[in-house]
Image (spheres, grey):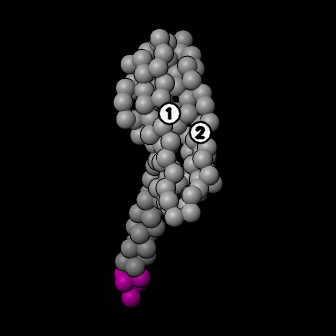
Amino acid sequence: MKLVSGYKMAKYVIACVFLAVALFGLIQASDLILGNVNAGDRILNSQVVFAPGIPGGLVSRAVNYTGIYNITAIRAYDRTFNRTGQAHITGGGLYQRYVNLALQTRFIGSPLDYLVEIYGR
């Protein structure tokens, strides 16, 4: 009898661990973190991108940066309460002098609120 309850407990623990990992991945999926900020790097661009939710639609915005320094790190932090955004690079990127970011909500009617920081030297 104890073997069966131990087996059920093991299945329960495995299910809980799987659920926790899946939820952690979902929470972290909305931020874009690339590169490292090292000594000597400076902030090249910092801006807040906000757009209210549209009933029945998705919201998207583009962030484009061009400068004279090479980009060493890109940070795009989703600041919405339920973290419903997604960010990805559409051009340029690390170790280049420009980057194009696409920011978009994943759910219909959700607002978009990102803090975008670009570092370089």
Residue 69, placed above or below residue 114: above
Q: Nearer the viewer, residue 105 or 23?
A: 105
Count up the numbered dots.
Answer: 2
Q: Position of residue 106 (x, y in %)?
A: 47, 56
- Tag 2 secondary structure: strand
* 90 horizontally vs 77: left or right: left
Type of the residue with mark 1: Val
Q: Position of residue 57 (x, y in %)?
A: 50, 59
User: What residue appears at the point 42 percent right and 17 percent down from the top-left corner?
Assistant: 97
Residue that carries the numbered disc 1 in the rendered image: 63
Q: CA distance from mark 1 to mark 2?
A: 8 Å
Q: Nearer the viewer, residue 9 or 85?
A: 85
Badge 1 vs badge 2, beta-carbon distance below 8 Å: yes
- Tag 1 secondary structure: strand
Q: Position of residue 64 (x, y in %)?
A: 47, 29
Magenta part of the protein: which range? 1-6
Q: Nearer the viewer, residue 53 or 79?
A: 53
User: What residue appears at the point 51 percent right and 51 percent down from the top-left corner?
Assistant: 59
Residue 27 visible to an observer of this rendering: no
Residue 1, placed above or below residue 120: below
Type of the residue with mark 2: Val
Q: Earlier in the sequence, mark 1 or mark 2?
A: 2
User: What residue appears at the point 56 percent right and 63 percent down from the top-left corner?
Assistant: 55
Residue 49 badge:
2
